[in-house]
Amino acid sequence: MSRARTRRCRFRRAAGADGPADAHRRRARGGCDSRRRRVTRFCAGPFGRTGTRRCRSAPTRGDVAGLGVLGAPVGGGIRRRGQLRVSRPVVSQVLAWRPDALIELAGEWDDAAGRLQAHTNLVDEAVTGSAGMFTGSAAGAARDAIGATSMELRGVCRALILAAAEARDAAEVITRRRDRVLAMVADARDEGCRVEDDGTVGPPSSPSSLLVACSGGADSVARQMLDVRAGELTRVLQGALSALGAADDEAATAIEAAFETAIAGTAPVRPAGVTSSPVGDWPHMSQDRIAASIAAMSDSERRRLIESKPLEVGNTDGIPWEVRIAANRINIANAILDERRHIDVPEEVKLRAAVAPTLEAADAERLWAALHADPVMRATAVTAYDHDAQARIVYYESLLADVPDPLDRDRRVPRQILGFDPQRQSFIELSGDLSRAHALAVLVPGLNTTFGAAADDVATARRFVAGSSGDVAMITYLGGPFPTGQLAAGVADAVDPRYALRMAPRLVAFSEDVERRVDSMPVTYVGHSYGGSILGTAEHFGLTADRVIYVEAAGAGVGVRDPSDWHNRNPDVLRFSITAPGDPIGLVQGIPLGPHGADPDRLPGVIRLAPGRRLTGGPMGGLSSHSGVLNEPSDAWRNILAVITGDREHIRVAG
């Protein structure tokens, strides 16, 4: 990318349109919109109004209908492929539903994935072990066939993990909507109304004496009021039943899509006219060429690429974001399976790990004997071995789960993971809806940010989305490992510039991808603490941005001593900084020959923002202000939001 977006440097609101919620959900689930249209429904509805035909590859307790979540079929039986009619359940069915059975089903699918993976591992080990004993063309053909089967089995494992995540989401949504229906039924009956199975509410047989009195003594007027009330209750109750049916149908679509699209195909992935694997060429291609190669693929080719090369697809700049999101759901499922593989090793392996190799031989032998003799010690050792992997599984499962919409807590939306690579400790997530936002921000956090504990940083991004009423979308960017440590250890790690030098080029490349994706939408990069040094170093290497904000920054970037050391591709970029008084970061900003460059607060051309006051009325400052400026509802937080949205009237500059 060579052009700079000078037309976007001024504060203005780019035109944007509200996107339908359903389209947003399809984009966030990832992949082609055709995926939703292609799926085969379980039947009249997935978990309760379903018939007996089971989803391909899905282990069930009998059939899904046997779970009793949504009883018998509604509307005349099986739904055909492509038929999108939403049928409304009846009250008696809703009373019998047991949505928590979906949680049980999700657990069974998770367990089945672990067992199937363990058996597949045994097959792979056996095939590998036969290489020296079983040779020749027949042996090669057999190994190829078994390898293809093994790949398909691992695809089934992945599908089970993804389907389990969808089942948990469905349980939460269906439970909430079922509770609403039941509350309405109870309220109507408390008023003396009759509630028919289809949700029709009939008025009480006679009005109360109080209602007649309030109607001027006219019985007919009181009855008319009861009829109006019954009609209103009917409308609301049937609407709630329809919403419950829609949630049921959406769950069916999501679960079937998990089984249909998560199983990797074995066909080669090559666009027309291309003879080599596109993934192998990507390191030598520009982002524009990568984007063009994806655009040249058919839907089925893109789908196979996602399924066969999810790690590369989910973490390569230039790939359309919808495709990256779809690939990263698979990457997260694979990460869960990797952790289960760690947990599913024989117990003897776990006990052996509890015996430190530094122990003297006699001590090791005594500990080994005690672990086998004492069941409590044995259980403790096994639990300790499993602990970290279990914690990562819980975290990864949260990444597959829907989250409350920042703009509507009663609505849930899928997470939009643009990067997920545990080996590189890379995690990138988009919060908000780009189709309705007028501005985009990219948050680069700081010290003690970790791949497995990015929830606080994502929560910060979601607060900016909510605080702007959706006008802002925000990306949380973890392009690799950050310095970590408490007290002296953390300070020692934070002065190491290598984290910034490693991550900055990745941020530069990602900014090119952002430029391609959002076009004329203004983009603001926010670097907090050590993230300020990463951001400044990225500007040194050629970041593309409309605005940058150095928030309680460790420095202006490695090697940045004056503004001429910044080489932002937008020559009209606007730069801001904010540092609250009393923040200890001020002790290291701009120290002579310091590793993180000059103090951005003091560089010419950088606009200093006023930290202002906290919500309590006290001044923003002190130790807690280091994170408070980004996380507390304060003048500083509103100042940062005003820069992101381009709201000049509400930007407060330091005096």
Image: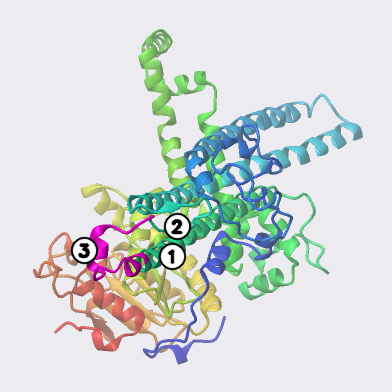
Q: How far across and how far down the image is residue 185, in percent?
A: 41, 51
**What residue type is disc 3 on?**
Gly
Q: Quadrant of residue 109?
A: top right
* Mark 2 residue crowding within 10 angstroms, few (<14) / some (14–19) / many (20+): many
Q: What is the secondary structure assignment of the residue under circle 1? A: helix
Residue at 28% over, 57% down: 208
Q: What is the secondary structure assignment of the residue under circle 3? A: helix
Q: Are marks 3 and 1 in contact (CB under 8 Å)?
A: no
Residue 33 seen from this side: yes
| Pointer 1 or 2: first along the chain | 2
* Foreground pick, 327 / 18: 18
- Rounded to the nearest angstrom, the CA distance separating label 3 from label 2 is 52 Å
* Mark 1 residue crowding within 10 angstroms, few (<14) / some (14–19) / many (20+): some
* Foreground pick, 28 / 284: 28
User: Which residue is under mark 1?
Assistant: 231
Residue at 45% over, 76% down: 543
| Pointer 3 or 2: first along the chain | 2
- Rounded to the nearest angstrom, the CA distance separating label 1 from label 2 is 7 Å
Classify residue 335 as left or right of residue 548: right
Residue 583 lies in the magenta stretch: no
* Foreground pick, 117 / 55: 55
User: Which residue is under mark 2?
Assistant: 201
Q: What is the secondary structure assignment of the residue under circle 2? A: strand
Quarter containing the N terminus:
bottom right
Classify residue 302 as left or right of residue 581: right
Residue at 37% over, 21% down: 380
Q: Against 343, is 17 above or below?
A: below
| 3 vs 1, front mark | 1
User: Which residue is under mark 3?
Assistant: 628
> Which segment is the magenta one?
205-223
